[in-house]
Image (cartoon, helix red, strand yellow):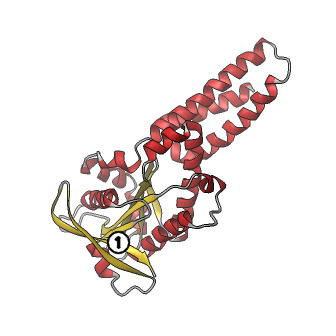
């Protein structure tokens, strides 16, 4: 029990310094194991050392859940409150990997996504169940990102920033995620029990500075397009709709013309619908 408690405390510490996305699966698994162990402990006589270990382990469980919840409260909504510079910093920290993803012309297609009404859903489910639901969501997102040759730049809360080498691959992943979430025979038991709706925004832009066109501005554009989407939708910018106008697997439906904070002019957005 002491070893399990120490392991959980280590996980909680790692989560607290911002590596939740890579450690959350282990935290969930060890939390479940710990709960079973604690239930077994309650049915057997315990001395002072066992009691202390159980108390420490219980505190570790609470720390993991509370820290994970704090990190996941805002999702992309929280990201959108950041400055353009902050968004650019996230991407530039991973610029070597992004450069490898970029198309020959130096562009990438960026995807931002998050869960609609995540804060109220968290309150309804409670922290522990919310973290488990996020685990199912994360596995689904990673499945389609990997399948369509994407690269996760940043995951925070229930939100993701992902880059793809082409817009077609990004749309394939995005529609795949939406299809899987809306499927009548949802594979994930947890997602069957608590359906979620994800909103997705896409934009194609340069992955490096080129003639004054900074990656940070394109990142901000993508984030704000995602903010305009409703759950279950994939919204894209005119650059993508124009480049893929002849696509045969999906079509672009004209959506709103909007002003995007911090970005000059009006921007026509397009809804992607599978055929």
Name which residue lies at 55% across and 43% down: 130
Mark 1, Cα crowd under 10 Å, few <14 / some 14-19 / many 20+, is some
Position of 48 relative to 201 (above/below): above
Name which residue lies at 71% across and 31% down: 4
Instruction: Say whether residue 253 is visible.
Output: yes
Q: Position of residue 270 (x, y in %)?
A: 31, 72
Position of 81 relative to 169 (above/below): above
- In the picture of the structure, the residue carrying the numbered disc 1 is 271
Q: Quadrant of residue 9?
A: top right
* SS assignment at label 1: strand
Q: Position of residue 42 (x, y in %)?
A: 79, 23
Q: In the shown orientation, is residue 34 left or right of residue 249? A: right
Name which residue lies at 45% across and 42% down: 120
Q: Position of residue 80 (x, y in %)?
A: 31, 49
Instruction: Say whether residue 160 is visible.
Output: no
Q: Residue furthest left?
A: 265
Q: Pick the quarter of the image with the N terminus.
A: top right
């Amino acid at each position: 029990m002491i070893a399990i408690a120490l392991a959980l405390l280590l996980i909680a510490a790692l989560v607290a310094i911002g590596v939740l996305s890579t450690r959350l699966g282990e935290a969930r698994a060890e939390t479940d194991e710990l709960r079973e162990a604690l239930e077994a402990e309650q049915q057997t006589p315990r001395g002072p050392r066992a009691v202390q270990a159980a108390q420490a382990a219980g505190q570790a469980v609470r720390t993991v859940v509370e820290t994970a919840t704090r990190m996941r409260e805002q999702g992309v909504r929280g990201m959108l409150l950041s400055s353009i510079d902050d968004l650019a910093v996230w991407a530039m920290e991973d610029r070597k990997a992004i450069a490898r993803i970029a198309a020959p012309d130096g562009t990438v297609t960026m995807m931002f996504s998050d869960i609609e009404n995540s804060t109220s859903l968290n309150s309804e489910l409670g922290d522990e169940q919310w973290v488990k639901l996020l685990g199912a969501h994360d596995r689904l997102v990673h499945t389609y990102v990997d399948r369509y040759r994407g690269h996760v730049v940043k995951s925070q809360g229930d939100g993701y920033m992902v880059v793809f080498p082409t817009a077609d691959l990004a749309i394939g992943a995005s529609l795949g995620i939406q299809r899987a979430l809306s499927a009548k025979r949802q594979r994930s038991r947890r997602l069957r029990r608590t359906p979620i709706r994800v909103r997705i925004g896409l934009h194609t832009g340069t992955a490096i500075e080129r003639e004054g066109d900074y990656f940070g501005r394109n990142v901000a554009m993508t984030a704000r397009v995602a903010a305009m989407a409703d759950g279950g939708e994939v919204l894209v910018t005119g650059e993508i709709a124009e480049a893929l106008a002849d696509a045969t697997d999906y079509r672009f439906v004209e959506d709103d013309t909007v002003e995007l904070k911090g970005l000059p002019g009006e921007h026509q957005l397009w809804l992607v619908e599978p055929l």
